[in-house]
Amino acid sequence: MNKQQKRWLRGILINLALWAGSFLWFHNVQQANIQTAVAKNKQMLGMMLMADIPFSAETVAETAVRDPQLADYLAGKQVDFVNALPLSLGEARPWQAFGCQAGNCAHVVWYDYGANGTINSIINTGTGQVAVVWTDLAARPIGSQYIVDKAVAIAAKDSEVTAVLGDIGAPDPAMIPMSGWLADDDCRDDWCVDLTYRDPSGSGKIFHIFVNLNQERVARTFYTRGRPERALGKPLAQGAPYRDGCAEQNGWSLCWEMTAHDGVNFRDGVYNGKTIFDSIKITQVEAWYPSWPGGYRDEIGFTGSVPPFGGTQVTDLGDGI
């Protein structure tokens, strides 16, 4: 090998070493930025989910899967833990035999990727006993802080996402990742979530990233209308979180509570000392926005994703409530 060939070989080896070092550095930075983005999302979720949770959701899930009934049910299935939410007094009553009262039992949800549905269970968080397990194949999970890691990691590998956001760890998310659907895509049936970020150009638009969690890919990106930031007239931050309550009026006495997963529950309805009903539930309301290119929905009437805010309005009907 002559001197020129040696110089070429040395140059190639040096470039390869520099390239390998740069690749490792970029990979480590990217992973760090993904973790930063996940941390930001979780911090935001913690601020938005203001309801008092009397237990650690992760601990409850770990306890639940040690129950033989649930362990057998989950065996062989590909699942992700979604959330664990405390049952209200009215919700807990069907499982009083398992010691369930207000706040000490939880509704725990997993997503079953094989069946494309939710696996649900009720567990006594004190005893660790699972009362019941069931599958709802028609249900897609609510938005949850426990799927942020997976959704952000998938989005960070997509070229369209990085072309707009660059380092995905830098932008602050606009809201929690909510379940979404696309009429002309596998997101019609698969579980997809919408990650939303403010347009880094400052236009005020929102950049949407539909992540297909079943297929672990970005299904679509698009913008929705917004407005530039303004010094004055910004909307007030949400406050006064919704609280369960009771009322007495015109001979009536009743209580209401926001359930963990499927609506507003009215309980203990008494009129002039006579019990009229034990429990009446107004089921969850979903407002669908099937605008192109993606469907969107508001989920109203339960404590799972974005809790309701504001006080309860009681209307006087003259002789009722």
Image (spheres, rainbow, N blue to C red):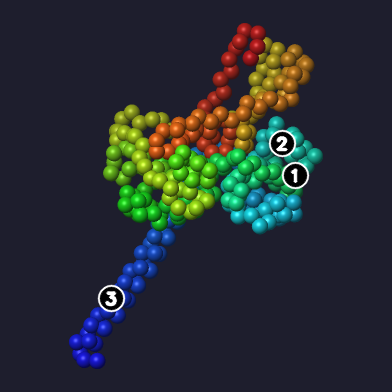
> In the image, residue 274 lies at what x, y percent?
78, 16
Instruction: State the quadrant of the N terminus.
Output: bottom left
- The residue drawn where x is 69% and y is 43% is 134
Three-letter amino acid code of the residue under disc 1: Ala
Residue with the most extreme top position? 318
| Circle nearer the N terminus (3, 2) | 3
User: In the image, is 183 to the left or to the right of 232?
Assistant: right
In the depicted structure, whether residue 25 falls above or below residue 178: below
Q: Residues within 10 Å of mark 2 (few under 14, many from 20)?
A: many
| Residue at numbered disc 3 | 15
In the depicted structure, whether residue 259 falls above or below residue 126: above
Residue with the most extreme bottom position? 1
- The residue drawn where x is 34% and y is 34% is 225
| Residue at numbered disc 1 | 131
Disc marking residue 92: 2
| Circle nearer the N terminus (1, 3) | 3
Q: Which is more foreground, mark 3 or mark 2?
A: 3
Residue with the most extreme front position? 184
Spatial CA span between label 1 and label 2: 11 Å
Closer-to-camera residue (142/273): 142
| Circle nearer the N terminus (1, 2) | 2
Three-letter amino acid code of the residue under disc 3: Asn
Three-letter amino acid code of the residue under disc 2: Ala
**Residue 254 image-quadrant placement:** top right
> In the image, residue 30 lies at what x, y percent?
39, 60
Closer-to-camera residue (116/53): 116
Instruction: State the quadrant of the C terminus.
Output: top right
Q: Secondary structure at mark 2?
A: helix
Q: Secondary structure at mark 3?
A: helix
Spatial CA span between label 3 and label 2: 65 Å
Q: How many marks?
A: 3
